[in-house]
Image (spheres, rainbow, N blue to C red):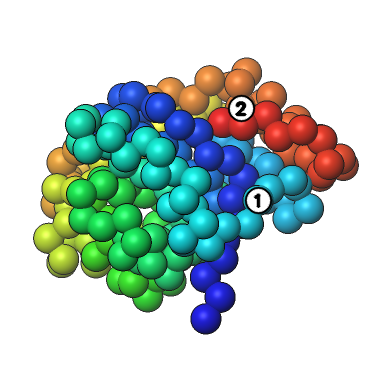
Amino acid sequence: MDLSANILAISRHRIGIDGDGVTTLVVFMGCPLRCRWCLNPQTLVLAYPHATYTPQGLYEAVKQDELYFLASGGGITFGGGEPLLQAGFIRAFREICGPLWKINLETSLHVPGALLEEALPAVDHLFVDIKDMNPEIYRRYTGADLGPVTDNLQYLVRQGKAENCTVRLPLIPEFNSQEDVQKSEKILTDMGFHHFDKLTYDTERHEKRERNLQSAQRNPQADCPGK
């Protein structure tokens, strides 16, 4: 079984950004969504320069920071793109790195439930990028249906994993309002989630990222700007 994965970037020595302690961010290629202001538009362009790793190969690339991980309670944060599309890879990586590293996911949860079920035993914490719990707002912003996200949120609650989730609730100019954010928080709180990260999208920065996507589509061999 081929568990190789296409990876856009590996970013080391991150502190307080995407998990406890010192973390290394691993950015996977590929995403099922087409968000209006994508954080990493290069992950959507298959021809964009990237590297291919097996779980063992990735472990060899990141194990140099093991002392930092163990001393700080940190580890690996898988982002993207959508990391749950690589559920088998993440599960295999956990078997190689062992139980002492923390493994975090930055996920939209917009994947088939079987992928979440496969990856979950290998994951310590999930940063869930919800966008908005209003189905119409979600569809306008992502181009997709909210249904799979809701199903996966309910699965996490049933598995007793709500306390292992930080739900990101952005205020997105032109798409939702502060009242919409509050409504989303109420829905999620009623479901059983209690850890939220509220933020406001910087329109200027996201418009620049949109231009990056258009540039990447026109010229996929340009240098990767990283995250």
- Left/right placement of residue 131 relative to residue 51 reads left
Tell me which corner region of the image, top left, top right, bottom left or bottom right, holds residue 191. bottom left
Residue 15 in the figure: left or right of residue 36: left
* Residue 119, x across and y down, in percent: 34, 65
Q: Is residue 100 visible?
A: yes
Q: Residues within 10 Å of mark 2 (few under 14, many from 20)?
A: some
Depth check, front residue: 20 or 106: 20
**Residue that lies at the very extreme toward the right in this rendered image:** 218
| Sequence order check, earlier mark of 1 and 2 | 1
What residue did someone put label 1 on? 51
Residue located beneath label 2 in the image? 206
Secondary structure beneath dot 1 equals: strand
Q: Which amino acid is tagged 1? A: Ala
Based on the displayed image, in which of its 4 quarters is residue 52 positioned?
bottom right
Q: Is residue 215 left or right of residue 73?
A: right
Name the quarter where the C terminus is drawn.
top right
| Quarter of the rendering containing residue 146 | bottom left
